[in-house]
Amino acid sequence: MNILARSLGNAFRNKVRSASVIVILAVAIGLALSMLVAHQAVTGKVADLKGQIGTELTVSPAGARGFEGGGEPLTGEDLTTVGNLDHVSAAAGSLDLRLSTAEDDAETGTEDDTTGGQGMGGGPGGMSTAGSTSLESAVDPGTLGNRNNGGGNDTGDADGSSGAPSFPLPITATGTDAADAGLSLTAGTAITDYAAGSSDALLGTSLAEHNGLAVGDSFEALGRSFTVTGIFDAGTEFDNNTLYLPLAAAQELTGRTDELSAVTVTADSMENVEAVRSAIADALGSDRVDVAAGSTGLSEAIDSLAGVQSISLVGFIAALVTAGLIVLLVMIMVVRERRREIGVLKAVGAPNRTIAAQFVLEALVLVVIGAVVGSLIAFAASGPVASALVDSGTDTAAAATAGGPPGADSGLQAPPDAGQAPANGAAPAAPADGGPGAPFGQTAELIGTVTTTVGAGTIAFGALGILFIAALGALVPALLTARIRPIEVLRGE
């Protein structure tokens, strides 16, 4: 008890120096814990990407991309064939549709044919729709929408604002047979009735808010009244302007019985993804279907996060070593200052281990206080530190991917069909920052937000590492006390 009391008192003998040491240690320890938390968060995100995205494949008609391209639609027989392949744990079909809105019907005075007629605007540049809906689009077409889809030519002003009348964007609807459509619900429940006569539907948040709809409300689509069973948040304005319907109902109401736009296949493990990809191409014909493993930029996302893992681990170790060096230098200085005190203690019979323990405890007092303050710093800084590391890693991966010439093989898969829920079970993917094929946008979208949690286990693990380094740093100068000879010290006095 005397040793502990003496250590506590000696730790604050020089209050200014002790306070300075505590502040420096708190910063180093806070950085170490932040790096540890970031490492654990990124490790969890990598496991999530590998476990969810990495085992999924998207099968689409060869030559098709969203509502563009060509090819022949997939069928229910194709879905059954794929589902029966070895190493396939699940297979779900979807049908992507464009619906003209109430705004468009009011402006044109027409109603689109439910069998996929010419649709909005007609003529060149008009967008074909599968039917109409009483909903109004929550997205303003703006200059880009009018330029790309309004008039079918480039006449008029450079910004495309003239030469084509303004029009409302159609709404993307997806018929799905998945239990939850891979969406994050903010209200209500997933579709429960997937029969052809079902009236269940899921709406994106912006589409529901723009039309003043809540769970339990009804709207018209494809000539049928649907009830909102749930509202989802897909993360982007475009994807939240979509709706999901039961696949069988969408097929029946559009006259596209047994037709599918895409099939999402889940392999039983990442190791079997390539085998499943080859089996699908062989079973359905490589000239008839395109099979994309995972999602766009998956390998880039995982590689960039692997780099962040390495950086955060190195940062954690470096911060620990820094804390140890601080303790080492401070305790060497303390031992030098208190040589007379050490000589007196040894002269009255104090053993070396007792004196060494006193200095170790003195250092640990400072480290424990610094660790408490550092933990508070980690709570506040771990999120920004993790985000900065992920952003830096994503930028580096994007720069490396984009370094080749246009059209060069970058290892990226084609983006998933518009309106289709991506493999990560979160938001339907939409090209970001730079348009389709932009590596940075796709990689960043796959990674999403890395959530950090400073839990008790993290603090305990970090604290053990910090205390070990601190004890090691204090023990070295403490052992130097054994070399101090009392007679020499006292003679010098």
Image (cartoon, grey):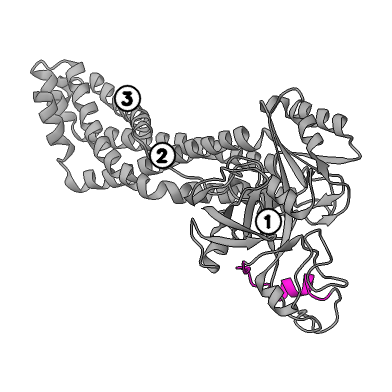
Q: Is residue 377 left or right of residue 357?
A: right
Question: Spatial distance from mark 2 to mark 3, Cα to Cα?
Answer: 22 Å
Say few, some or many: other residues with alpha carbon within 10 Å of mark 3 (under 14 / 14 to 19 / 20 or more): some
Is there any visible trace of residue 416 in the rendered image?
A: no
Amino acid under label 1?
Ala
- How far from the left and from the top, in percent, is residue 27? 35, 46
Which is more foreground, mark 1 or mark 2? 1
Say few, some or many: other residues with alpha carbon within 10 Å of mark 2 (under 14 / 14 to 19 / 20 or more): many
Q: Which residue corresponds to the image point at 82% horizontal and 70% vertical from the top-left?
A: 126
Q: Which residue corresponds to the image point at 85% horizontal and 77% vertical from the top-left?
A: 154
Residue 273, quarter of picture: top right
Magenta segment boundaries in residue numbering: 135-151
Dot 3 and dot 1 residues touching (CB under 8 Å): no
* Residue, disc 3: 476
Q: Nearer the viewer, residue 190 or 163?
A: 190
Q: Which residue corresponds to the image point at 50% horizontal and 46% vertical from the top-left?
A: 189
**144 in magenta:** yes
* Residue, disc 2: 32
Q: Is residue 283 left or right of residue 243?
A: right
Mark earlier in primary sequence (3, 1): 1
**50 in magenta:** no
* Residue, disc 1: 173
Asked if residue 263 is positioned above or below residue 492 in the image, the reply reads: below
SS of the residue at dot 3?
helix
